[in-house]
Amino acid sequence: MDDPIQNEPPRQPDGWELVCAGVLSTEFGRRPSEAVANAVMQLATEEAEPVAVRQGIRDWWRSLRLMPRLVLSGGCALVVIFLAISSWLIFGDRSPVHTFCTVTAELNSQWANVSRQLEKGDTLAGGTWQLSSGVVELTFASKARVAVEGPARFTIVDDNSMELAYGKLSTDVPKPAHGFAVKTPAATVVDLGTRFGLNVSSDDSIKVEVFEGKVRLLTNSVEDVPGRLMELAQNGVVTLTADGRLTRSRGISESDFPRLSTTVVIHPANCGFDGDGKMFLGDVPTNFGYWSGPSFELAPATQEVAPVEGRGMLHFLPPASGNDSVVWQAIPLRKYRSMLTNSDLQMGSFAWFNRARGGVNNVKHVGLSVAAYHGDLQNVHDLWTRRHELALAVAEKELDIDNDPATWQKINISTALPPDADFLIISMHAVAPDNADPATAFSGDFADLVDCSVYTPLQPSSANR
Amino acid sequence: MIQKSQSLHIFEVLAKQHEPMLLAYIFSIVSDRKLAEDIAQQTLLIAYRKINSLQDPAAFPAWLRGIARLEALSAMRKQGRELAVDPDAIQQMDEVYRQFEEKFSTDTWEERFHMVEECYQKLPETLQTVCRLHYFEDLKAREIADTLTLNLNAVLKRLERARVAIRDCVQRRMNAEVSSEIS
């Protein structure tokens, strides 16, 4: 085709032409675009933060909702009140969050630039922390859990998000905490209900590995390269350099990241000695789920001693033979097995003990024992008395008990638990005094609130094990 | 999935409805499809955050264009790009979009844009080709010139002729549409 006026410079298009050009560029509205999806994703991420419910949006939304119904109802007061109440219910301010997360475990953690090393049980309300070495486990108010391995520098932003400047972390995010976000120098990683590992190197490049579930990655804009939004599925790996170069691959290596602890608390039946569940006076129990022992009772509060919790406690009575007073309970483990990974299992138990002010005949020692066995609950007497040779694992401890009825003393025990354990036998005992006189001994020895847990401890990545 | 508030959900539906118009509008100003995507995203973020300043929900698309215009101009300034569009033309463009909305108030943007497509289909083959390369396949005029072994000015002229032809065709149809409605 010839262009007779092609040497004239093109003129600027008018508004109509501009519109036509724009329409052409969208292929008449059919060309796919990510603009809305990306914007909404970013807004939803922001809304996941506690400050996100903005007054303006609330008002606008309220006016949108109110308008048509007001017109329809002719301004019926009841409708207005109903809508006002429902809006208030939906948009009512959240109560302020003072504590964003708690240190729920730590292993050899060393902190820099702090007046005091952080310990298990410490609560954090925002701020930046520098972990020189070791591993720390944080549990956010949202229930998201994070294991951070040093050297690392992180900032607690709010009850469901944090920033990681460098270091390694892994997360476990249960349903209520979906949307948990970790901001890094190269991207923001948003959790969609999952476990993932994140490594931020000193050159600001990042690596994300999805162990389970899905995560969403919002990469930062670098100069004129705009940020991208992508989803990463289970087993997916993404590395992203600080200048925005991105590589996707598959095949995770969970041991490259710190491992969160997992805990299953196993309550023995009637663990607080409050209930009326079955109990037997006798030998080691031949079945699961009840306390058995030669001489004990459930006691209410006495004049001197109140239960740790609830209305009852265990009262050790002297056995007729003048031996130690013992109670046992057998606890099945098989039903918990699927909840725990099979390596590095630990079992732990604790119980509280107390003794009333008493004569010289009162016991001086109390003890807590747990033994784990493989197989079936048979020949229990033998299993218990020969536990040091027949059990897979035994943990036990005795305690010198003070003479103060106002204080309860706690015994904690723990040991490694082989993965093939099928049941536990837990026992508490009060050691008979040397000159035990059945008439006067054990006038006031108590135990209360016993619990067991099976757990895998917090662990560093394989490089630091 | 990450939780969306109900207001964000409503906003998403509204924004999705106007997404083609928003992208077309921004492209008209910046002539760069990728940049238009970014500006559209930025526009939507601002729109949601400022939505309480929108008094009349029916004015949403025009209000969105207002934000987009400012964002597009500021993005061009930031990138040091020369604005190839006359400010009066932008104003006229707003007027054209308003006409689209008024005359076809119940249509979606895809339906409104269909008229432009019909006019494009009527273009001679040579003009369709440059349009396709430039607008659908994002080739710059210089690249089209190389592909078709034409000089740059010839490509620019063909693009202009195509736009003018489509414009005239769309204007005729819009007027016809109005008169058929009246009669």
Image: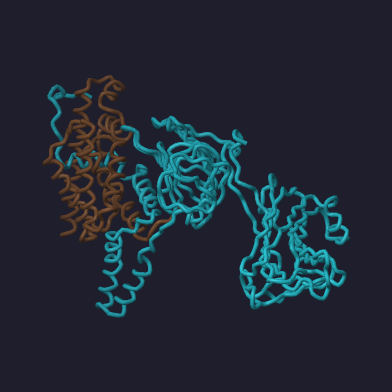
> Residue sitting at 24 percent across and 50 percent down?
B64
Query: Of A63 and A53, which appears nearest the observer?
Result: A53
Q: Position of residue B6 (x, y in %)?
A: 37, 61
Of all chains in the rendering, the one displayed in brown is: B
Is B164 left or right of A169, judged from the image as shown? left
Residue A308 higher or lower than B66, as above or below: below
Residue A357 higher or lower than A150, as above or below: below
How is the protein colored in the picture? by chain
Is B173 left or right of A388, judged from the image as shown? left
Q: Quadrant of residue A301?
A: bottom right
Residue A152 seen from this side: yes
Q: Position of residue A101 (x, y in %)?
A: 47, 53
Q: Position of residue A431 (x, y in %)?
A: 78, 63
Of all chains in the rendering, the one displayed in cyan is: A
> Residue sitting at 53 percent across and 34 percent down?
A249
> Residue sitting at 35 percent across and 56 percent down?
A51
Query: Of A286 and B149, which appears nearest the observer?
Result: A286
Residue B1 seen from this side: no
Q: How many marks?
A: 0
Q: Position of residue A365 (x, y in %)?
A: 74, 61
Q: Quadrant of the C terminus of chain B?
A: bottom left
